[in-house]
Structures are given as C-alpha cells and as structure tokens.
Amino acid sequence: MFPYLRLGPFLLQMPLLALVVGVWMGLTFVEREAVRLKLNKEKISSLVFYGLVGGIVSARLAYAAQYASVYLPNPFSLFSLNTNTLLPEAGLVFGILIAGIYAYRQKLPLRKVLDALTPGLAFFMIMTGVSHLLSGNAYGTPTRVPWAVYLWSDYRQPTQLYEIFFALVVFMIVLSRMIPTNAPGLRFVQFLSLSAIARVFIEAFRGDSAILFDGYRTAQVVGLGILVVCLALLRNWEGKDEHESKIG
C-alpha cells in the first residue's frame, strides 16, 4: 500500500495517478482501434471525454447527496481530488448515458464504437487494480495462505493482485484477438464476459464486499447478470452485420 508520494511541498495521490495513467493510455488504445475500424478518431475521443467527465461529476454529486450534511456547510469540498468520495455506480450509469447520447447525436455505429472502446477499457481495468493496490481498497478476507499480504492489521487474500492479474489476462486476450469474432460488437461482449467472470471469482475473496439482504455479494450478482446479458447479445449479434441486428 502506497497511497501518497511527497514531492517537496506537494502530496501526490498515487491511486489517483494510477487512474490518470489508465485513462491516458486507455484513450491511446481507443484511438488506435478507432482508426483500425475506420471510425472518426476525434468523435470517439470526444465521446470518451464527455462520458468520463459526466461520469466523474455524477459520481461526486451522488456521493455528496448521500452525505449532504457534510457537504452543505463546505460545498468547496466537492472539488476534492479524493477518489474515495465518489459513488462509482452512479458515475458509471450517467457516464454511459451521456456517452450514449453523444454517440446517438453523432450517428456513430454503436457496435463498432463498443469494439473501439474495448482495448482502452481493458487497460483501464488493469490500472484500477493498481489503484486499489496502492490505496489498500478492495482488500481481501483474512487468511493464512502462504501468499497472504499483511494489510489493515491482519493477513489477507491479495485480492488487488488477483484483480491486476486477471485484468492483464483479459487485456492480452483483447489485444491478441485470440478469440475470433465474426460480427461488430462481439469483441466488446467477450471482454465484458471475461471481466464479469473474473469479478465473480475475485469477489469470493473480498473482505469489503457489499452484501445483499440474503447474504449474497452484490458484485457477484451483478457479474452473473452481466453474463446473462452477454449471452443474449452473443446469440443476437453473432454472424450479423450491425445494420441487420435489432440491437444497435
């Protein structure tokens, strides 16, 4: 865990730096893939920008709404660079919505856009794991396995390392295109499926999971739901051109 780096009078947040690197390098991969797919690189970059900014703002406002008693006396704290004061679920929903509206208005082909975004998203997942490792978030359950790490006053499963490892595997699969596709959008669906499987596995070792009322881990339920959606999309999109599909 290495949350901060002091550079003279400045205190650099290392988890935030990891996420910034993830966005920067991820956008590079997205632009390259957009060119390969003969998409307008500038429009794809704008889509990422609007979705990212809208997602971050929404995540901060949603978090502030949950803790209004803290933010109302000090509204300038909304501009904090602390990544722990975000509500990722709200940011994801609104970020996707804003990016989707932009894509619709620009008449961008949905499934090709999703394929262009895939390598960037895959790289960002790696850096998300690095961010968790640096901050100590997404920590594992107590254990005595030989590869346990000492964190938060106990030996725990190194779930952040699991996260980085599986994200690297998915990223390499995406880049190598070792899973063949025969229709636009399938590479994104395959990335989403592999990421969901990894999440279901890793979540079993997490010590800070959100739990549903019956004791089920929320992220595992969501991951399984994503897998069901991915199977439906694979069945609907496989072997079809984008203009032939009922989706996109």
Image (cartoon, helix red, strand yellow):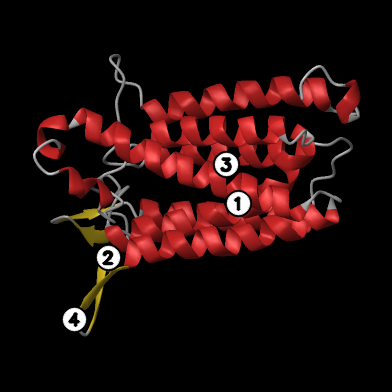
Nearest the viewer among 132 and 45 is 45
Judged left or right of residue 13, residue 193 is right
Label 4 close to label 2 by CB (< 8 Å): no
Q: Earlier in the sequence, mark 3 or mark 1?
A: 1
**Sequence-earlier tag: 4 or 3:** 4
The label nearer to you, 2 versus 1, is 1
Mark 1 or mark 2, which is nearer the start of the sequence? 2
Quadrant in which the C terminus is drawn: top right
> Which label number is shown at residue 209?
none
Give the tally of numbered discs. Answer: 4
Which amino acid type corresponds to the residue marked 3 in the rendered image?
Ser
Say which element carries label 2.
Answer: loop
Residue 9 image label: 4
Q: Are circles 2 and 3 on residues that touch, CB within 8 Å?
A: no
Question: Mark 4 and 3 residues: CB-CB less than 8 Å, in contact?
Answer: no
- What is the distance, in whole Å, between disc 4 and disc 1 at their CAs? 35 Å
| The quadrant where residue 145 appears | bottom left
Contact? badges 3 and 1 (CB < 8 Å): yes
Mark 2 lies on residue: 1
Q: Nearer the viewer, mark 4 or mark 2?
A: 4
CA–CA distance in space, label 4 to label 2: 21 Å
Residue identified by numbered label 1: 122
Name the residue rendered at 64%, 35% in the picture.
102
Q: Earlier in the sequence, mark 2 or mark 3?
A: 2
Asked if the residues shown at circle 2 and circle 1 are in contact, with their CB atoms under 8 angstroms apart, the answer is: no
- Which disc is residue 195 wearing? 3
The alpha-carbon separation of the residues under discs 4 and 3 comes to: 40 Å
Instruction: Between label 4 and label 1, give the one nearer the viewer.
Output: 4
